[in-house]
Every structure is written in structure tokens, then in C-alpha cells.
Image (cartoon, rainbow, N blue to C red):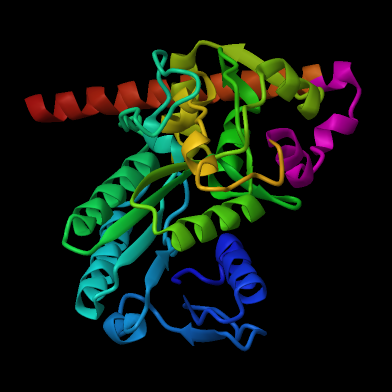
Amino acid sequence: MTGAHGSVGRRVVARLAEQHPTVSVVAIDKHAPPAPYASVTTKQVDLAGADLGALFSGADAVVHLASVVAAGTLKEAEVELETALLHRVLDALGAAVVPHLVVMSSAMVYGAWKDNPVPLTEDAPARPNPDFDWAVQRHRLERLAQQWGQGPGRSVTVLRPAPVVAEDRLGRAAHTLRAARSGVTADGDPPVQYLHADDLASAVLTAVSGRYDGILNVAPDGWIPPDTLAALEGPRPRLRVPSHLVRILSALRWRWGLAPTPPGVVPYTTHGWVVANDRLRSLGWRAAHSNEEAWVVSHEPHPLESLPARRRQELLLAIAAALLASGAVAAVLIVRSLRRRRRAARA
């Protein structure tokens, strides 16, 4: 298993060691400390330079959880690095004649579109929103793994989890989405899903033990309707504006380093993209946490929730005014810069 020291990786290692003590596990991570289990061998290596063929030798399956990028706008170098790492993993799998691979993707590869069915099954086409680089990259890596799996004697499980959370902690995608739903937000309140990291670890074990060949959505049963989510979140300062204005503001805040939400994530907060889990359930998997329970255990009360309602509204309006003013100033500066360039070109 690569990425064995991550939030999900640690849980998978622990479950394997405790539930299947006769299974030998090689836990690979750049920063992994030794695991306290007799059946687990820890390898502190960098995937970019390690002899992966030797590490994978004799394995019945490889779970590839390592990732070098977060949910956001990716730099070209990051895309190239992560793609190169997967190529190295796939080449080593072939050299070591490993029959099964499990890779981690995301339900966000389905994209957030008005015509999405509710819920999305694995038969739905992957249509990641083109300006959300992270989802586009997840889909690109999926295709590489699936191409490898077309070889004789090979199978690949692609896991597409809903936004992942854990105790007092949001995963990368969940954190990005929650930030995008605060402050100045776009019109639209789609249903949402939250997946506890324990349940994702359980899904990994299901994929490994069943040698499933194909795509598996990972999410609790059902989803959280907008009104229920609003009740769970409590009073939060939000100013509704058209989505195209939110995109502009998000682009400016992202460019200036003022927010963790890239503009490409805006559609994921306005259109539904919840997924069905029937295929995974048919393999015997069950979520131990509902969507609501996963949300509650990961929730840290926002400081603004302690303020009176009137004060929250005043603060929201002040923030919105500042953002709009910043956008206007930026637009003026851009126009002036373009005019100077035109004048210089004519001269």
C-alpha cells in the first residue's frame, strides 16, 4: 500500500492487521513510522526514486493511495509529477506480475451539472467540470489505471468516494467545498454527501478481498437534503449572488491567496452530484456512519456562530462590500494595463 501514513491509509493498515493478522502488509510512505503490528512491514521510501518492482514483488494486490496534490487548481509540474508516479507504479506492477490494483479517485469526476440524475450510478459518464483541475486529473489517472488493467490476468478497482471526513477534520475535497459554501456564495443548494474515513477504509478492504474489477462509488446510503444541511450548520453568514459573479470573486481571491476555493469548484456547490452505493453494498459493504453522522463528527463550530444574528449579518455585508470593491479595483487595474499595452504596441 502506498500512502500508508495518510488518514485513510493508516485505517486500512490497522484494519488489515487486526482483522486479518495472517495477511502480510507492506506499508509504503515517505514519512511513515513503523507500524505496531507483526504482520505489517513499513517502508519509508519516495515513490519517485524507489525500486517499486522489488517492493511489489510477491504481492497479491497493490493499493495506491499516495497523492501529491490537494483539491484545487493544480500547477503543471504537480500534474506531471503525479502522473509520472502512477506510471512508475503501473510499470512496477507489470514487472512484479501483480494481478490486482486499487486506486483512489473521487465522486467529483462525475462533474456537477444541471442534468445529473439523483443519484449517479457507476454507469453514468465521467464529466468533470473542465475548469476544476483536480477532478480532471483524478479522471486522467483513472483512465491510466484502467488501461493497465486491460492486460491479461489483471484487474483494477477504481474507488470514487464522496467527500471524506474524520473526527474534527475535513478531507481535502470536503474542506474546499465547505469553504466555497461560506461567505459570498452562488445560488443553489444541492443535496450533499459526507463519507467517514473509517467507511472508506472498509471499502478499500472490500475491493481488495473481492478483487473487484471496475468502478465503485463509496458513500453512505442517501444524502443530506439542503434544509437538513442548513439545520446542521446552523446560522452561517452567506450572501447569495449569481454564480458568474461568485466565479469572478473566487478567481480573484484564489489568485491573491485569500481563499482555499478555486473558481472551478463553484458548480459543485450549485448542482447535485450525489452517488449511489448499490454496487458496493452488493459486495457486502455497509457504511457505519450516515451522512449526517459523518458531518457531525467532523464539524468544528465556526467562531461566527457565537455572534448575534444581527452582528453576523453586518459582518457579512462588510465582507461582501470589501470583496466587491476589491473586484472593481482589480477590473480597473486590468483595463489600465491593457490600455498601456495597446498604446505601447501602437508606438
Q: Quadrant of the C terminus?
A: top left
Q: Is residue 238 left or right of residue 132?
A: right
Residue 252: image x %, image y %? 46, 31
Q: Residue at x 76, y 39 (%)?
A: 293
Q: Is residue 246 left or right of residue 101?
A: right
- Looking at the rendering, in which quadrant would you find the N terminus? bottom left
Q: Nearer the viewer, residue 88 or 305?
A: 88
**Residue 258 visible here:** no
Quadrant hosting residue 177: top right
**Pick the front one: 95 or 129:** 95
Residue in the picture at 34% in, 26% down: 334
- Residue reaching furthest left? 346
Q: Position of residue 170 (x, y in %)?
A: 65, 47
> In the rendered view, would you say 229 is above or below 86?
above
- Residue 32: x and y, percent? 55, 79
Please tell me whether the stretch drawn in magenta is mainly helix, strand or loop: helix
Magenta span: 291-312
**Residue 120 image offset from top left, x and y in percent:** 44, 26
Drawn side of residue 98 relative to residue 311, left or right? left
> Residue at horizontal 50%, vertical 31%?
275
Task: Give the vertical position of 216 relative to 97 (above or below).
Answer: above
Residue 334 horizontal side relative to residue 194, left or right: left
The total of numbered circles placed on residues is: 0
Magenta residue check for 304: yes
